[in-house]
Image (cartoon, rainbow, N blue to C red):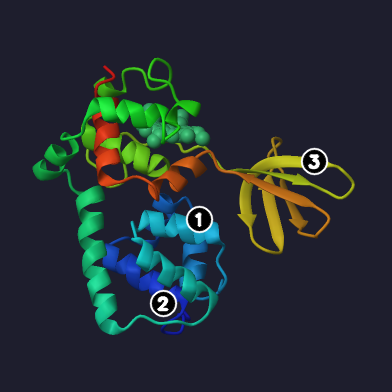
Amino acid sequence: MKSSAPGSFGAHLKALREAAGFTQEELATVAGLSVHAVSALERGQRRQPHRDTVKALSAALDLNEATRQLLVASGRAASSLKPEQMADLAHFLHQKVYNTLRTGSELQIQNILTGDPKAGEAYFNGAGKCNTCHSPTGDLKGIGRKYDPPTIQSKFLFPRSVGFGRRGAAPVTAKPVTVTVTQSTGEVVEGVLQTLDDFNVVLRDAQGNYRSFKITPDMKVVKHDPYAMHIALLDQYTDKDMHDIVAYLESLK
Ligand code: HEC
């Protein structure tokens, strides 16, 4: 199997993924991508990943802004990390991912429980705009009774991949990403997104048929990711916000 040139996006991604201790399958699940996509990126088959893809991957790998910039930059042009930077990064990521996703350590639970439920409620109805999609008396009613704090935390940080590596969490069926294709003739086709790149879009329609379109300038392709907001929010939470939200959700008994 061919692997990408050192310094390329693919090489960075592979190194980061391995440093984080993820298999390709795990990273794909967490990032909401197909295993095929992750593999193609790593092998350099796709050299110009979409911004959204980079964001999802970096959110999954829990990268900080500087690292994300590097990853984005390397998706555009061949830039490279020095081996020592890579080692630092690997170390940092490994710890970070290990702490947040893979362990249910006492320390982590205590940290999570230091949040302030009142501040969490304010964030929920304010800056987080969580109340535009959720309600404490509706869909999230009693969530504090259903899940322990680490599970709640991973549920809102990574709603698509809940239960990954976490003991006791139930598997979930993630809501699919859908796409609406409006052709130049005005015909509108909707379905579950299969693949989307700069040239083609493939979807599965309600009848279960796979439909493939060549993307032309006179058509409109709109992607709907039910978790887009959660992915965007990952960039915005501070640790305090996160703990406050968990404390608030935990108080919804
Ligand atoms: C644009 C809509 C949207 C916004 C805004 C949003 N979410 Fe979500 N959230 C979703 C969707 C969609 C799901 C998946 C629900 C499902 O699969 O039933 C979800 C899932 C969740 C879950 C898991 C629920 C469960 O029972 O498994 C939690 C917890 C959650 N969100 C908390 C939050 C918090 C906290 C915020 C604000 C910081 C927020 N959400 C903002 C759309 C949103």
Query: What is the C-alpha distance between the residues marked 2 and 1?
Result: 18 Å
- CB under 8 Å between discs 2 and 1: no
> Could you classify mark 3 by the number of other residues whose Cα lies within 10 Å: few (under 14), some (14-19), or many (20 or more)?
few
The reply to whether residue 25 is in sight is no
Residue kind at label 1, given as amino acid type: Ser
Q: Please indicate, yes or no, whether residue 71 appears anywhere in the rendered image.
A: yes
| Residue at which label 1 appears | 34
- Near-viewer residue (40 or 82): 82
User: Horizontal placement of 45 versus 134: left or right?
Assistant: right
Sequence order check, earlier mark of 3 and 2: 2
Task: Name the residue that disc number 2 marks.
Answer: 11
Secondary structure at numbered mark 1 = loop
In this view, which residue lies farthest toward the right? 185
How many residues crowd mark 2 within 10 Å: few (<14), some (14–19), many (20+)?
Answer: many
Residue 189 appears at what percent x and percent y?
Answer: 76, 41
Residue 50 appears in which quarter of the rendering? bottom right
Q: Mark 1 or mark 3, which has the lower sequence index?
A: 1
- Which residue is under mark 3? 188
